[in-house]
Image (tube, rainbow, N blue to C red):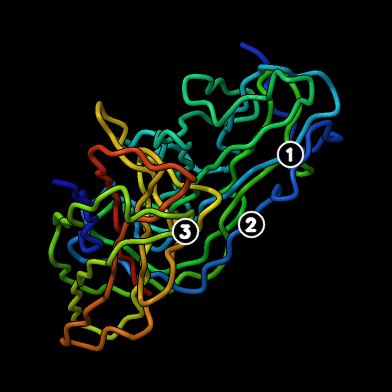
Amino acid sequence: MQCLKLVSLLLTLCASALLIPHAEAACTSPTIPYDVSVPEIRVSNSLTPGSIIPGTEQNIDVEGNCNDNRAGMPIVACYYGSGNEIAGYPGVYKTGIAGIGITLINQQGQRVRGGGTQCDTRSTPLGYVSSDGNNTFNFNVALALVKTSTNVTSGTLQQSETRFGIGVYGHEGIGTPNTVSYAGTVNVLQVTCAVSPQSLNITLGDFPVSDFTHIGATTSEKGFDVNITCDDTVQPEVMLSSANGYESSYPGVIKLTPENGAATGVGIEMMFDGMVATFDQYKTTASLAYINQTLQIPFTARYYQTTDTVTPGTANGVATLTIGYK
């Protein structure tokens, strides 16, 4: 049986000098420096301390090159802010707002832990400089706010307390300045939402290989809804991701789960609110979730042919759906 399984539906209610922050950069990226401004966030009363506040994750694609030879060297990050690491929450640092911390996460899902311009975070690298002679790099990081207490207050995020530096270990930073940070006045509004279902299996069905006649051919779609009910009117946001990765040439298509006997030449196309899904980014829903009314958020999934030839086999996929709100 071929099926698409949505798992971990995140219930949002639920000894060297390493980085040189202001030196002339020999390594550059058009996305660094990167500053995030957030006018307002909503924090669920039932969100467990230590959890990322849904809707605050900012995925940053960092692509660039180094002028000097840095082949194979690790790219790392260090917390540059003035806050301290919060006891009990490794890799989460104080922001100056009670109950809210800041963290940087590498593309392996690890929170970077280490502060100052001379920290050593090679155990949680962000990426590596290529060894092909071009000295390029391409990686993703996520900057996010974390609920650190049951009591959360409003306040102002200062870049001096939310800044992380990024650079080649033992050498220069990437960009001038080489930092990513949060800033802005945060009006924290407590709200409670319920999301259902928390996980589900979607059976896409069995299809003969002969149905796949050309790249872009699709099967019939299967639809499903995710429901959200809140005690205040909110604007829901949805982020889709998959541990399997994506078919980069085909928007909205996730790769099949690698397993023995798996089919080849197809992926699974995801649709959200009638539009092709955009992965690893929050997108607002077409409608608000009004106070004490259930909003049904529609999704569909179907097989999508990605190569000229399709071979038969199991065709499973996995996706994670995160619901945020503002």
- Give residue 41's position: percent from left, percent from top: 40, 70
Q: Which residue is mark 2?
A: 35
Mark 2 or mark 1, which is nearer to you? 1
In the displayed structure image, the side of residue 130 where residue 66 appears, left or right: right
Rounded to the nearest whole Å, what is the CA distance between mark 3 and mark 2? 38 Å
- In this view, the residue in front, 61 or 3, is 3
Residue at x 15% of width, y 86% of height: 292
**Marks 2 and 1, the one that precedes in the sequence:** 2
323 over 144 or under it: above or below = below
Residue at x 46% of width, y 61% of height: 278
Tell me the crowding category of disc 2: few under 14, some 14 to 19, or many 20 or more residues within 10 angstroms, Cα based.
some
86 over 13 or under it: above or below = above
Residue at x 25% of width, y 37% of height: 313
Amino acid beneath label 2: Asp
**Marks 3 and 2, the one that precedes in the sequence:** 2
Mark 3 or mark 1, which is nearer to you? 3
Q: Which residue is mark 1?
A: 64
Q: Which residue is mark 3?
A: 216
